[in-house]
Amino acid sequence: MSGSEYDAIVVGAGPGGASAAFWLGQAGRRVLVLEKEHLPRYKPCGGGIPKPLFSRFPFDFSTVVEREIGQVRFRFRDGREVRAALPDRPVAMVMRDRFDALILQHARAEVRDGSPVTALRQDDSGVEVETRAGESFRARYLIGADGANSRVARLVGLRQRRQMGVALEAEVPADERLLAEYAETALFLFGVPPYGYMWVFPKAEHLSVGVGAFLGRAPALRERLEEEMGRLGIRLDGAPCHGHPLPIHLRRERLHCGRVLLVGDAAGLMDPLLGEGIRHAVDSGRLAAEAVLADRPARYTRGCSGASAPTCGPGYSGRGCSMSIRAAVLSWVCATRVSSTSSCVSLPGARRTDVWPCVPCRISCWARRSGGR
Ligand SMILES: Cc1cc2nc3c(=O)[nH]c(=O)nc-3n(C[C@H](O)[C@H](O)[C@H](O)COP(=O)(O)OP(=O)(O)OC[C@H]3O[C@@H](n4cnc5c(N)ncnc54)[C@H](O)[C@@H]3O)c2cc1C
C-alpha cells in the first residue's frame, strides 16, 4: 500500500468529487482525490449553472464565468417560440475544465490525476482501492464521484438497474453576429428528438450546442443536431461532437453501501427533464462530506431523499416525479401547439395546480428556485 491511511478517498474530480473534497478538507480531514484523466480535463457539458450555486463556496467564481444569461428562448416543434426574460442574469456559463479545476484548487486535498480506480474492497473499518498502475490506498470512507458510468457503483453493487439517456455536445466557432445574437441568451429546442431537446449556450468566444435524448433509441443524433443548428444559421463545420450518458436516478435507490457513498452523476442525481446536474453534484458532494464527518453514511441516502436536502429532494426521491411522468409531460408539451408568443404559454388542459403546469414556466423559474435554498 502507498502512504498512510486517509480519512477519505474521493474517486473523480468533477464538481461532485471536488465539492466533497473541499468540505472534508475544510473540516481538517486527510483527503486523497483519485482522478482517471490528466487535469484539467475536457468534460462534455453545456456549462449552464444557476449563479446562486457560487455562494455555496467561500471563494470567487468570476474568473471562470464566460457569459451571464438574461433571456431564455424556448422553441417548439411547430416553429413557435417563447421568450422569457430572466431578471438579474441569474445563470452563468462556464467551461467545465476551468470550473471544476477552480473548486479542486481550493480543496485541501492530495490530488493524483491519471489514476483510474480499478478495484475496491471494504471491511468494517475502511475501504481499500487499487489504481490501474497497481498502487493501492486505504481510507475510512470512500466517495464515488466518478460520473455516469461509475466504476465505484458497479464495484459495490449500487445503481444496478441504471437508466441512461444520451447527449452529444460540440463547441462551435461563431462569428460576431452569432455571438451578439446569443450573448445573453440560452436557447432550448423541444421536440427534436422525441423525448429530448437541443440547446444553444453562449461561451466567451464560441457557442456550446448539443442534443439530449432521455428515452427510446436516439439514432443519428449528430445529423439531427447539424440539421437543426443549420436552420438557426449555426454550422458545426466538422467540430468534434462529444457523446456522454445522462444518468437517471430511480426512485428510492440506495446511494451508499457500507463506507462507500455515491455523489453526482455516479448516483444518477441529474434532472431528467433538462439534464442539469452540476448543482446536484455540488450539493450531494457536500451532503456526503457531512455524512462522513458525522460517521453516519446511512444519513447520506436519507439526506438526498429528504425534504431537508438542499437540492436533492423532490425530483430525486420517491416523492418526486418518476422518469416516465417527466417523459410523458415532455412529449405532451412537445406535441402541443403553444397558444401565444408572450412570456408564457398556456397549454390546453393544464391547471396552475398541476405539477408541471407549463414547462417554460418551470424552466424560467429554474435559476431562481435552484440556488435560493
Ligand atoms: C452533453 C451534456 C451537457 C450537459 N449540460 C449541463 C449544463 O449545462 N448544466 C448542468 O448543470 N449540467 C449539465 N450536464 C450534466 C453535468 O455535466 C453532470 O451532471 C456533472 O458533470 C456531474 O458531475 P460529477 O462530478 O458527478 O461527474 P463528472 O463531472 O462526470 O466527473 C466525474 C469524474 O470522474 C472521473 N472518473 C471516471 N471514472 C473514474 C475512475 N475509475 N477513477 C477515477 N476517476 C474516474 C472522470 O474522469 C471525471 O473527471 C450536462 C451533461 C452532458 C452529458
Image (tube, grey):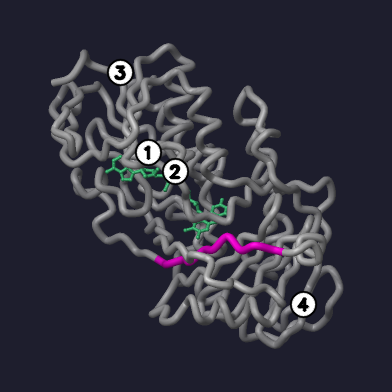
The reply to whether the magenta stretch includes residue 169 is yes
Residue at (48% x, 55% y) in the render: 44
CA distance separating discs 2 and 4 = 36 Å
How would you rate the neighbour count of disc 3 (Cα within 10 Å): few for under 14, some for 14-19, many for 20 or more? some
Provide the secondary structure element on which disc 2 rests. loop
Residue at (51% x, 25% y) in the render: 105
Give the x, y percent position of residue 328: 52, 77
Looking at the image, do the residues carrying marks 2 and 4 touch, with CB atoms under 8 Å apart?
A: no
Quarter the C terminus occupies: top right
Quarter the N terminus occupies: top left
- Give the label, 4 or 1, closer to the camera: 1
Q: Nearer the viewer, residue 115 or 246?
A: 115
- Give the label, 1 or 3, closer to the camera: 1
**Extent of the magenta region:** 165-174
Looking at the image, is 74 positioned above or below residue 339?
A: above
- Give the label, 2 or 4, closer to the camera: 2
Looking at the image, do the residues carrying marks 1 and 2 touch, with CB atoms under 8 Å apart?
A: yes
Q: Nearer the viewer, residue 242 or 236?
A: 236
Give the x, y percent position of residue 182: 76, 62
For mark 3, what is the residue? 7
Looking at the image, do the residues carrying marks 4 and 1 touch, with CB atoms under 8 Å apart?
A: no
Residue 32 sits in quarter: top left
CA distance separating discs 4 and 1 = 42 Å
Looking at the image, do the residues carrying marks 1 and 3 touch, with CB atoms under 8 Å apart?
A: no
The reply to whether the magenta stretch includes residue 235 is no
For mark 1, what is the residue? 38
CA distance separating discs 3 and 2 = 26 Å
For mark 4, what is the residue? 81
